[in-house]
Image (cartoon, grey):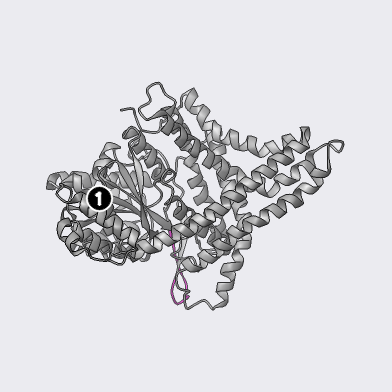
Amino acid sequence: MHDIEIPLGKRSKLYRFFEILPGLLSLSLLLLPIILAVFNPLLAAIFIIVYTISWIIRALVLAVRTLQGYSIMRVAEDIDWQARLNDLSDPARALGQAADDGGKPQYRAAHLANLKRLSGQRYPLPSEIIQVVIIATYNEAREVLEPTVQSVLSNSFPAKQTILVIGYEARGPEATRATARELADQYREHFYAAFAFEHPSDLPNEVVGKGGNIVYAGRQLQAWMEKRGVNKEHVIITTLDSDNRPHPSYLSYLAYEFIVNERRHECAYQPIALFLNNIWDVPAPMRVLATGNSFWNMVNSLRPHMLRNFAAHAQSLVSLEKTDFWSTRTVVEDGHQFWRSYFAFKGQYEVIPIYVPIYQDAVLSSTYVKTLKAQFIQLRRWAYGASDVPYVATRVFSRHREVPLLDGFFKFLRLLDGHVSWATSSIILAFGAWAPLVFANESNRSIVAHELPDLVSYLQWLGYIGLVLSIFLSMKMLPPRPARYKRRRNLWMILQWALMPVTSILYGSSAAIYSQTRLLLGKYLDKFDVTDKSVVSQSGSGRVQHTASHE
């Protein structure tokens, strides 16, 4: 098997070419309307019209898919996954009872089909499954960490089959280090086992970030399991950020999917990340971004070919041993883990959606200005996933390729297209129609140049159909309004969507351009910039400030 690690130090010429490629394509695409306007305004107008129509269609499709994703998520939340898991203990008996657990007919049919398929086979029984939850922390307060621990404890899956691991940093403050140890001690008797592992600050070949933290915790746990004789074939590991609140049925659902999947070790399991924990408290621009990101995660759960590891995700211990756990060389270890696994398993790897949410915090700092800055820092880290482009390209376009060429090629194209679109689409849609009017020579400027901004504006009104659907769904997804806010807060939750074009450019496109430009120049992000987030007390009497190293 080829080395699946990101190279350290100087890159090869081919690797550098593909590092430059996303930024080069993005900048070229942004300049294209201007260049076309100078030389052929009509061609520029055609390009802008076709581009706008294609994105309107895409926006409408995404809106419909978001509604579908929301519907499927609500159905999955209503299913008693622990009851279904218990059925797997004796499929023949469960088939005889043909119990109705409340799912819709098609979901009951899928469950019954699983029971029939497993009858008479050897597979991991529910009582044999060991779940591990690794919570990464840097300098979070107890008020942040303990609710996450409690949400794991209150999951429907038996706590006595769950191992709690809190990975904390030696470079972090003593208060957080002490809290991690105290929580492990306090909750140990409730779980199969509980640990607090301190990640040393001076390990070689590591960027400063979450990856090194959870890798160290994973290896410590692996050694403990080997001494105890734990069957690694039955171990599933979920990584959480310190503010994550898994749905009460998440672990049961995860165990169920793990058992019924015949290729259980050749895949990851991805719940839906919803940034709604503190959505009522964050400023309007952050609410729009957090809700939009939540929608995107729901949509991707319906597109297996696009689904990647993101934020909280799970793999079996066998799978993680194949990749030597996660990467310690990137600040985007979650999404990068998909590619490491894809190449480690020679293309025989996929991500299985888990249609229940992991609730997370939206960005919120101690002041409005700090919040705006913290949001950009978070998004530029996400956008640094463009660093996977050279990683994937040099392995797909290699004489020693170990993955199917067509599959790898189309995955590479989707990866590249996603990052280029992230950097360019909002800017082109907002300003592209003005290029023929502003940059065309007066002698070449036609009636089309004068009418194009109005024409594109009329076309974009069709996109507001998708916006209306988004507003409707965002209101349905909101957690209960805290008592400290009056009913008029609901109105601002609707009016905030007027900011979407601005946030798309100032945060979406700008963050992507920033990260791609760093790659283009070889100025690599080698430090995980933690994201400022604040907790507002229920009474509204004050804020407890904490800094969270979240995805």
Q: Is residue 251 something that shows in the picture?
A: no
Near-viewer residue (357 or 136): 357
* Residue range (magenta): 537-547
Image coords of residue 426 (percent x, y):
62, 48
| Residue 154 lies in the magenta stretch | no
Classify mark 1: residues with Cα within 10 Å, few (<14), some (14-19) or many (20+): some
Total marks in image? 1
Q: Is residue 218 something that shows in the picture?
A: yes
Q: Secondary structure at mark 1?
A: helix
Q: Is residue 196 left or right of residue 75?
A: left
Image coords of residue 427 (percent x, y):
65, 46
Residue occupying image coordinates x 46% and y 35%: 410
Q: Quadrant of the rendered structure where residue 403 is?
A: top left
| Quadrant in which the N terminus appears | top left
Q: In the figure, 496 relative to 39: above or below?
A: below
Near-viewer residue (218 or 306): 306
In the displayed image of the protein, which residue is found farthest to the top? 399
Q: In the figure, 266 relative to 467: above or below?
A: above
Give the residue at mark 1. 260
Residue occupying image coordinates x 49% and y 23%: 13
Image coords of residue 110 (percent x, y):
30, 55
